Amino acid sequence: METQTRLRRLRANPQIRCLVNETEIKKSALVYPLFIKEGKGVFEEIPSMPGQYRYGIDTLDRAAEELRNAGVKNVLLFGLPTEKDKTGSGAYAKDGIVQTAVKKLKGMGEFTVITDVCLCEYTSHGHCGALVNGVVDNDKTLRLLQKTALSHAEAGADVVAPSAMADFQVAAIREILDGNGFSSVAIMAYSAKFASALYAPFREAAASAPSFGDRCGYQINPANKREALREALTDEREGADILMVKPAMFYLDVLAEIRKNTLLPLAAYSVSGEYAMIKAAAERGYIDERRTVTESALAAFRAGADILITYHAKELAVWLREKD
């Protein structure tokens, strides 16, 4: 009974409750995904993700101001090109949409810029690599991912994040970066990226759905925890600086398992489907958005994440400030 009395005492007082919190959400650990689209005056709300927008280079100042006001200093960039081709050449163009956005954001001097390194937004077929006879060819894909990562580093990216799930992608990117004087650019590997239904709103936002087939051949089967752990530990051996689990919500057991097996920083990506579900339920009054988002973020950090990539980053940062 004495223990229960002490527990009730700790729970009853809000100030004491905060004092003994085992898990904390930090603004510095939040990363906001940004969609950058080619074209002038682009500011388009994404229908499947209310409150999220596609920005152009000339409207990027608006996004930066919103992030600045919220206190979020970390961004993950996704490029949406006007033209696509079979090899996704826009991904590694020196004057590509992401490369241009990186230069502009780094010129502001306040943002940590992470870039998604993949081809799916740039290929006419929507797959994450180069195709040979209708199948993603790993070796050809690695060369294109190397070119993409190097172009991002040359533009000023702080972190490159390979998400194509190609075999040996981390080792290949580390080699090309180190060989060209970019050993200080970190790699955040999409290590445990599952073939999830929760990516649908993102694919609508980025117009990146495959034109045929699916990505189950190179993304992880949702049934396989041990495979995810193998992928993560392989990325660590190849030189990754940060490991990632994607999605977050349905894969916290995977996140916790990887946490037990690595000392590297670990990121959780709360993906578009998670955002859309919370938004839809909140708009109908079924749940409280602030409490649900906060609880979801706490769950990711409690499971072992050091970094949370989330479309709710701005709201979370504001709520944390109000709490303080």
Image (cartoon, helix red, strand yellow):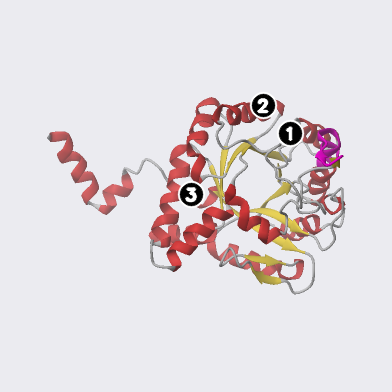
63, 120: nearer the viewer: 120
Find out whether residue 321 is within the magenta segment.
no
Nearer to us: label 3 or label 1: 1
Label 2 sits on what residue type? Answer: Thr
- Within 10 Å of disc 3 (Cα), the crowding (few <14, some 14-19, many 20+) is some
Q: Is residue 209 visible?
A: yes
Nearer to us: label 2 or label 3: 2
Label 3 sits on what residue type? Answer: Lys
Residue at the image point whose x is 70% and y is 58% from the top? 206
200, 39: nearer the viewer: 200
Find out whether residue 134 is within the magenta segment.
yes
Q: Quadrant of residue 3?
A: top left
Q: Is residue 39 above or below residue 86?
A: below
* Label pair 2/1, CB-CB below 8 angstroms: yes
The image position of residue 83, as x and y in percent, is 85, 61
In the picture of the structure, the residue carrying the numbered disc 1 is 170
Residue at the image point whose x is 21% and y is 50% from the top? 12
Residues under labels 2 and 1: Cα distance?
Answer: 9 Å
Residues under labels 3 and 1: Cα distance?
Answer: 28 Å
In the picture of the structure, the residue carrying the numbered disc 2 is 234
Q: Is residue 9 above or below residue 79?
A: above
Residues under labels 2 and 3: Cα distance?
Answer: 29 Å
Q: Which is more N-terminal, label 3 or label 2?
A: 3
In the image, which residues are magenta?
A: 133-146
Q: Which is more N-terminal, label 1 or label 2?
A: 1
The image position of residue 265, as x and y in percent, is 57, 36
Q: Secondary structure at mark 1?
A: helix
The image position of residue 188, as x and y in percent, is 66, 40
Q: Main secondary structure of the magenta part?
A: helix
Furthest residue in direction bottom, as rendered: 41
In the picture of the structure, the residue carrying the numbered disc 3 is 26
